[in-house]
Image (spheres, rainbow, N blue to C red):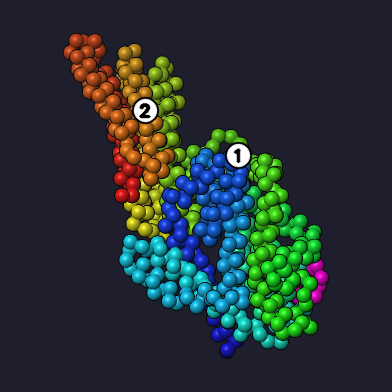
Amino acid sequence: MDLIFQILKLLGCLGMFLYGMSLMSGGLQKMAGDKLRSFMAKMTSNTFKCILTGIIVTALVQSSTATTLMLVSFVNAGLLTLGTAIAVIMGANIGTTVTAWIFALSFGGSSFSLGAIAIPLMFFAFLCISSKKYTNLGEFLMGFAMLFLGLTLLRETSTVLLDNEPVRRFLGGLCGWGFGSVLLFMVAGACMTLMLQSSAATMAITMVLVAQGYIPFEMAAAMVLGENIGTTITSNIAASVANVSAKRTARAHLLFNVFGVIWVCILFHPFLRFLGSIVELFGFPNPATTSFEGADASTQAALVASLPYCVATLHTLFNVINTCILVWFIPVIEKVVTWMVPSPKGEEEVFRLKYIHGGVMGTSELSINEAKMELVRFGDICRRVLGFIRTAVSATDHDEFEKAAESLTKYEGITDRMEYEIANYLNEVQKGEIGHEGAIRIKSIYRIIGEMESIGDTGDNIGRMIERAWVHKKAYTKEMVVKMNRMVDLVDEAFEAMHHNLDTPLIQLTDIRNAEEAEEKINIFRDFAREENMSNVEDGLYSYELGVYYMDVINALEKMGDFIINISQAHFSAKPN
């Protein structure tokens, strides 16, 4: 019974650790918001900056997965090339080693214990969360406290659970198969990372095992290599239902780590000796040459204290050397992943979501950003409706008109479907924890997708209006066609302004005068066309019925302009004060 309790306690400590990591990472991402994404977009002018950006961002958010997700969104939006994203991934792999050093500080022989301050820190975290103004900071502090409290309890609980002779004999037996044991522990590290969905958790468990003497340093090194493989499997599974850019980015991450593991396995013992010589420079015993058995008490104590730092050093050295080698082969990696994930043949299916097809992301703030990018694409799809309207208006035979009208009906269905799918996505996002600004942005997105769906409806209605003119054999005059095409041009200018506003980060959007000016031009032309139409009917230039068909199209295009200005206004209303 006591064994079952200890196992449950161990699982509880692991759960506290994982939840703390998630809470801390989420709080940091919410605090950073658009500033972090803006930093990533700007700091990518050369390869060195790309790598530095990956290091900084991943060290801040404590999650290489979050960094990779942001990279995928940037590649999809065209803000970053695939080659640039690969360079940032290399930096992200180095940045994630910061977590290992923090753990080493907690495990090592330092008198300062992060676990000791965890519980007092929870009080200050609670105050921040209660204040609402500093909720995100409170989440970060609470996650930090839970992370290291869970880490401390994990070490204590595992010691009680594993500190017995049968367990030591079992682990000792697994370590006695030479290089086969290295492969075995590598697979174990990869599987643990895959099951726990956290390379940080595997790193913590590895440090527990090696610091308490349950496994030798060589097997801990093998687990670290496996963890690097496991974390890429997680990202590739997540990308399996996503778009081409996401899959290519995930494959690049896989190639980077697999290449590193292969060369380390080939040079496993020379690499560990090289690592040991570096550790010796800092005054620690060399784990590759110093045997725990037979050493004096002081040497044993020094070796135990050094092992967590050795694991962290190995993790850092692995990623730094790997980056130094592969940074010269980024174009080759780009070609390989493009070959591995070719672009789909044929025309893109516009009715499928492109940026958020893979599901809700790790945090609500990042998910909102994905939805925002989908809005830009949704707007561009709505803009295609104008081309079909122009064709329908200018058609000289019924077959040409019918083809355009069918396209207008098709795109009305596309906009309906996109509105539905984005709304469903937002519903899932709202199930997570969202800050005040995030809630405002989601409200604006709901309004925007409604307006865009109305644009699709209007396009279909215009097709029906023109159809009535064909049915009643009322052909538009050349002047009417010119005027309607001019109205289409003005609406297209409004679409251009809308695209610019949606594509501009809210923190950089100072006003929407471009949209307001475009809307004013549409209204002025509508009024001019109305007055001219009344005069032409009174002068007998064409029938009143034809004038009605003509003005129906002009008014519908003006109504489309109203939807477009509403989109810019809704987007601008979400701008933080």
Q: Quadrant of the N terminus?
A: bottom right
Q: Residue at x 32, y 18 (%)?
A: 483
Q: Kindly identify which numbered label has been placed on residue 123.
A: none
* 516 magenta-colored: no
Q: Kindly identify which numbered label has been placed on residue 493.
A: 2
Q: Earlier in the sequence, mark 2 or mark 1?
A: 1
Q: Where's residue 270, x and y in %?
A: 80, 62
Q: Residue at x 48, y 72 (%)?
A: 146
Residue type at the position of mark 2: Glu
Label pair 2/1, CB-CB below 8 angstroms = no
Give the labeled residue for mark 1: 344
- Measured along the vertical axis of the image, is residue 241 above or below residue 514? below
- The one nearer the camera, 384 or 335, is 335
Q: Where's residue 480, x and y in %?
A: 31, 16
Q: Residue at x 44, y 61 (%)?
A: 27
Q: Which residues are magenta?
A: 174-181
Query: Which residue, as the protein is rendered here, is positioned at the far right?
Result: 178
Residue type at the position of mark 1: Pro
- Measured along the vertical axis of the image, is residue 10 above or below residue 529? below
**Rounded to the nearest whole Å, what is the CA distance between mark 2 and mark 1?**
32 Å
- The one nearer the camera, 389 or 207, is 207
The answer to whether residue 45 is seen in the rendering is yes
Indicate the secondary structure of the residue bearing disc 2.
Answer: helix
Indicate the secondary structure of the residue bearing disc 1.
Answer: loop
